[in-house]
Image: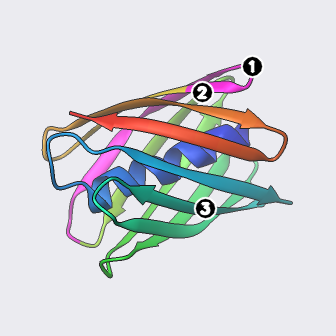
């Protein structure tokens, strides 16, 4: 389940770092090897984000950069099937929220300092996950 939440976190940071319209579709993949997850995500406006997440116990540290030269970093902590996340980007914006996992599906609910809400799901098959988010 930690892999699912890592993927959700990257996707959410992508939404904060790249979203400029009222609605923005985001998609991508993540692959996990050991305690490190490698992420590649794209948005409907043509932007992209890549980076890594490193897991230590119930805490994960995230570092990402986007195609516009911005960066996002943050942490997440997992308790049971719920992960609490907090991120900050290079422009001073922040994103926080939760992800809840049930089986191979994770449900995401986040908000940012600009008043946007981001919701969606992640489905995981083996060590590969697929995330879809909507921003309002």
- As drawn, the residue found furthest toward the bottom would be 69
The local secondary structure at tag 1 comes to loop
29 sits left or right of 45 in the view: right
Looking at the figure, which quarter contains the N terminus? top right
Q: Residues within 10 Å of mark 3 (few under 14, many from 20)?
A: many
Q: Is residue 114 above or below residue 69?
A: above
Looking at the figure, which quarter contains the C terminus? top left
102 sits left or right of 65 in the view: right
Q: Position of residue 54 (x, y in %)?
A: 68, 62
Taking the spot 40% from the left edge, 54% from the top edge, the residue there is 13
102 sits left or right of 100 in the view: right
What span is colored magenta in the figure?
Answer: 91-106
SS assignment for the magenta stretch, majority: strand
Q: Position of residue 4 (x, y in %)?
A: 66, 39
Q: Are marks 3 and 1 in contact (CB under 8 Å)?
A: no
- Disc on the earlier residue, 3 or 1: 3
Location of residue 83 by image quarter? top right
Tell me the distance, in whole angstroms, between the alpha carbons under discs 2 and 1.
8 Å
């Amino acid at each position: 389940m930690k892999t699912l939440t890592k993927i959700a976190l990257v996707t959410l940071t992508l939404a904060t770092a790249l979203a400029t319209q009222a609605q923005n579709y985001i998609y991508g993949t993540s692959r996990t090897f050991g305690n490190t997850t490698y992420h590649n995500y794209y948005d409907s406006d043509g932007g992209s984000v890549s980076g890594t997440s490193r897991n230590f116990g119930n805490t994960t540290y995230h570092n990402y950069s986007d195609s516009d030269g911005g960066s996002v970093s943050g942490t997440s902590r997992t308790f049971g099937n719920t992960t609490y996340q907090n991120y900050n980007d290079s422009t001073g914006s922040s994103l926080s929220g939760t992800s809840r996992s049930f089986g191979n599906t994770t449900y995401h609910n986040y908000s940012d300092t600009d008043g946007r809400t981001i919701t969606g799901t992640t489905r995981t098959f083996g060590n590969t996950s697929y995330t879809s988010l909507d921003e309002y």
